[in-house]
Amino acid sequence: MAVVVGFIPTEVGFKALAAARHEAEQRGGPLVVVNVLREGAGDDPRHADSQQLEIARDQLRGATVRVAFRQETTEDDIADVLLDVVEEEKAELLVLGVRRQQDLARHLLGLTVQKLLLSADCEVLVV
């Protein structure tokens, strides 16, 4: 069954990517990497450009499972996009990155992460 990772091009995003690869390989894959672009927010640091996506691809080269990249655009909630991908892919795990451990409580209480934790029809791993 699939592993989906919500990817942002930051240090923690690459750590989540590594954790997702490990989980996908342990579970027999595939791995679906999702970067969500918010319409009208072109300079958002969470948006991965082509160079950052290539770095992510390099990190996943040699994976023993199929790897797919999806860049989704939305005007709506990022959580809804990730939940749709989890459903489409019939994922058994969703991997999310959190910036710093001391920010964990704030992020868990944040709307996007809270919605994903409560609404995902699969396990959620927070890195």
Image (cartoon, rainbow, N blue to C red):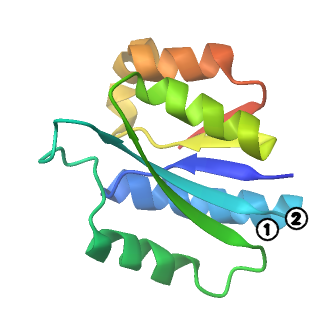
Residue type indicated by callout 1: Glu
- Badge 2: residue crowd in 10 Å (few <14, some 14–19, many ≥20): some
The residue positioned 84% from the left and 63% from the top of the image is 26
Percent from the top left, x then y, of residue 98?
Answer: 41, 38
| Vertical position of residue 122 compared to residue 94: above or below | above
Q: Secondary structure at mark 1?
A: helix
Q: Position of residue 79 (x, y in %)?
A: 49, 26
Which mark is on residue 118? none
Task: Give residue 84's quadrant in the image.
Answer: top right
**Residue at horizontal 37 percent and vertical 51 percent from the top:** 8
Q: Can you give x and y, in whole percent of width and height, for residue 43 in the image?
A: 11, 47
Specify whether 16 is left or right of 46.
right
Using the rendered view, name the quadrant where residue 121 is placed: top right
Q: Which residue carries the number 2 mark?
A: 28
Which mark, by number, is residue 25?
A: 1
Residue type at numbered disc 2:
Gly
Residue 35 at x, y percent in the picture: 43, 50
Q: In this image, 119 relative to 45: left or right?
A: right
- The reply to whether the C-beta atoms of the residues labelled 1 and 2 are less than 8 Å apart is yes
Identify the residue at horizontal 42%, vertical 29% (top origin): 78
Locate residue 76: give its quadrant: top left
| 53 up-or-down from 119: above or below | below
- The residue depicted at 42 percent of the width and 12 percent of the height is 109
